[in-house]
Image (cartoon, rainbow, N blue to C red):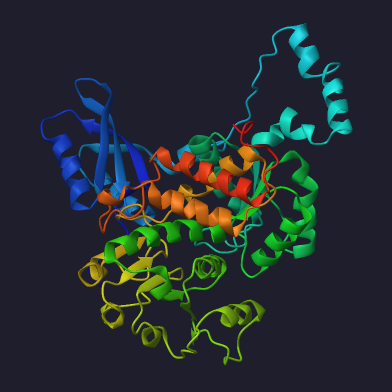
Amino acid sequence: MDDIPDYLPSASNSVTLRLDITNRPGMLAEVTSAIGARGGNIGAIDIVRANENVMVRDITINARSVDHAREIVHEIRSIDGVTVQNVSDRTFLMHLGGKLDVKSKTPLTNRDQLSMAYTPGVARVCESIADNPEDAHRLTIKSNTVAVVSDGTAVLGLGDIGPKAAIPVMEGKAQLLREFAGVNGFPLCVDETDVDAFVETVARMAPVFGAINLEDIAAPRCFEIERRLKERLDIPVFHDDQHGTAVVAVAALLNSLKIVDKDLEDLKVVIVGIGAAGTAVTHMLDEMGVGNIVGVDRQGAVHNGRKDLDEAKRAYARVTNPNGETGSLSEVMEGADVFIGLSGPDVIGIEDLQRMNRDPIVFAMANPRPEIMPEVAYPHVAVMATGRSDYPNQINNVLCFPGLFKGVLDCRATDVTDGMKIAAAHAVADTIAEDSLTSDYVIPSVFDQHVVNRVAEAVKTAAWEEGIARRDRVHSR
């Protein structure tokens, strides 16, 4: 596997170079050849200005990593007749000043408008809410606003980097809510890792929000935080790292099973990595009728006989591994129909795939390098999916959470239930017509504009059926 690159050039590692290039034939070709020789992809070439001696150009280059970009720049600096004026990291440029803004929905250009938006007119609205607190959903930003809350302890694959460093991710989540679903999201990064204090902080801020999206909180603390906030608040609380991942993974599995002609009830599923996401995927599959799920951690199969399990894993063992399988990941892969990876790079190989049942389904979701590279797995599997955008079948939470929050806010649900999550999974899966399903198209694109509304409608329908919606079908948006 050494010949497979860890990364492909992408916009996430792109730079724009401003170059002074001596104005003589062949110079631009020399620059572009140097970029290509170093493995960079050229995105755009623009002329800034020119005179008889020098052509000033901006060249945008996609690289594999920060170090790779530096190598390309170093190569260009070595070309006689080329001066590098400036190097701009395009990702950092996007984040300058943050990715969010607060905008007024109404103009304030005269005294009448000011007197209605603020004092004295606003006092009557405040009194209305004081008399009937439910009016806050109708008369304030609460009706369409989600708090995106983190403590910064499990950010992406970076780990515990703290609340300030988590802000760009929470801003991104809020931006996705706005761009994909028209929902306001506000980043709240709380400088607190004590469960009691964290729950108290979020609960005290909750009045202004219609829902809470917990994000990037380390396990097992995230389980307790979510449970306690759900008990305390009358608005939906949803830990996207757990349940968003589960919804989209299950959606991909539902479509994969149509390709291999297998049923949920007959599957053996091996899940490696049983933290927040792995536990949620397991719970959802169990709710949907999968009876043979084997979880695996660094010490091997999780089973009731192990003495080294913490409380979360003991609870996991009680509801999984019905045959009491023991041993390593490779050993429990024997006869598996589905492998779901939520762990780290290169934990399985070809031999493990060959131990699986006919037409194996492999979801290797570790980022940036999955549990097995698709190029290695393709000849041995029926369906392959990853968490990466540069391969087919990306399992991406964006397919779930914008539509889910749109749905719960529209119907003013009090909770997010298992039934609502299962409905969301079916909605994502059903976005692809059965006659369009292929092994490399079992999950829709994150840019498929039908997904958000399908998920929102499915979530609302489930909420109405379960009796947890405070707005009826007639008045729902």
Which one is in front, 366 or 88? 366
Q: Is residue 179 above or below residue 201?
A: above
Left or right placement of residue 442 versus residue 240 in this view: left
Residue at x-position 53% and y-position 48%: 401
In percent of width and height, residue 180 lies at 48, 38
Which one is in front, 448 or 46? 448
Q: Is residue 123 above or below residue 334?
A: above
In percent of width and height, residue 402 lies at 53, 43
Residue 6: in sight, yes or no?
Answer: no
Left or right placement of residue 335 versus residue 380 in this view: right
Locate the N terminus by quadrant: bottom left
Which one is in front, 449 or 35? 449
Residue 230: in sight, yes or no?
Answer: yes
In percent of width and height, residue 310 lies at 64, 81
Residue at x-position 14% and y-position 38%: 29
Q: How many marks?
A: 0
Residue 378: which quarter of the image?
bottom left
Q: Is residue 96 above or below residue 288?
A: above
Q: Is residue 366 above or below residue 426?
A: below
In percent of width and height, residue 317 lies at 57, 82
Locate the C terminus by quadrant: top right
Q: Residue furthest left?
A: 25
Left or right placement of residue 246 versus residue 40 in this view: right
Residue at x-position 40% and y-position 45%: 446
Residue at x-position 60% and y-position 88%: 308
Left or right placement of residue 241 versus residue 225 in this view: left
